[in-house]
Amino acid sequence: MRKNSSRSKRPWNHDVFCPLPAKSCPSSGEYLSPEWWKFYEEEPEFKAILQSWDCGYEVREDSSYSVCQTWGVADNGYYLIHQFRDRLEYPDLLRTVKRLADQFSPDRILIEYQASGRSLVQDLYNNTRLSNQGREDNPGSKQLRAELVTPLVESGRVFLPLRANWIS
């Protein structure tokens, strides 16, 4: 389990931690160009760890996935520590959120307040001590979310793991 006693409780930009669209870079490369991404092998010391959930609703083949991204906030930028992606029914989703929270000890869990995210926020608030926040202010379409994070990625402040079993 990840513990870091020197984490500060400073504010962070919530828009950065919306799960990024799976295909944020159009064929023209105008949003998130592949050469902008930075990679890391060792994690630095983090000031905060955040988890961001975009929850699906059903397990059908054509249903959206539930996605959790775990981010570390460091002096030099934002580090994607882990990504979970699966189609889950609500009871499995709730168990998974608790398991990943236990595994990574996030300072805050951000949950998109749509679909099963509404029930998730209420259950976590009423039945756990996890620090979670429902996000109704989703900054819009996947294209708009990609545009919002473009300056951070282009400036070299967003880091992806060089090796992870969940990267294809």
Image: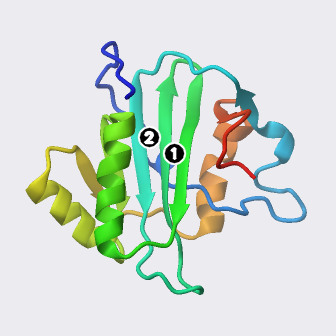
Callout 1–callout 2 Cβ contact below 8 Å: yes
Residue at (26%, 71%) from the top-left corner? Answer: 118
Badge 2 marks a residue whose secondary structure is loop
Q: Is residue 26 left or right of residue 10?
A: right
Where residue 23 sits, quadrant-wise, is bottom right
In the rendered image, the vertical position of residue 138 relative to residue 59, given as above or below: above
Q: Residues within 10 Å of mark 1 (few under 14, many from 20)?
A: some
Outermost residue, right direction? Answer: 28
Mark 1, residue position = 16
Residue at (53%, 77%) from the top-left corner? Answer: 64
The amino acid type, in three-letter code, at marker 2 is Asn
Q: Position of residue 62 (x, y in %)?
A: 59, 87
Residue 36 seen in this snapshot: yes
Q: Position of residue 37 (x, y in %)?
A: 76, 38
The circle on residue 52 is: none
Residue 136 seen in this snapshot: no
The circle on residue 13 is: 2
Q: Is residue 33 left or right of residue 44?
A: right
Q: Position of residue 147 (x, y in %)?
A: 66, 55
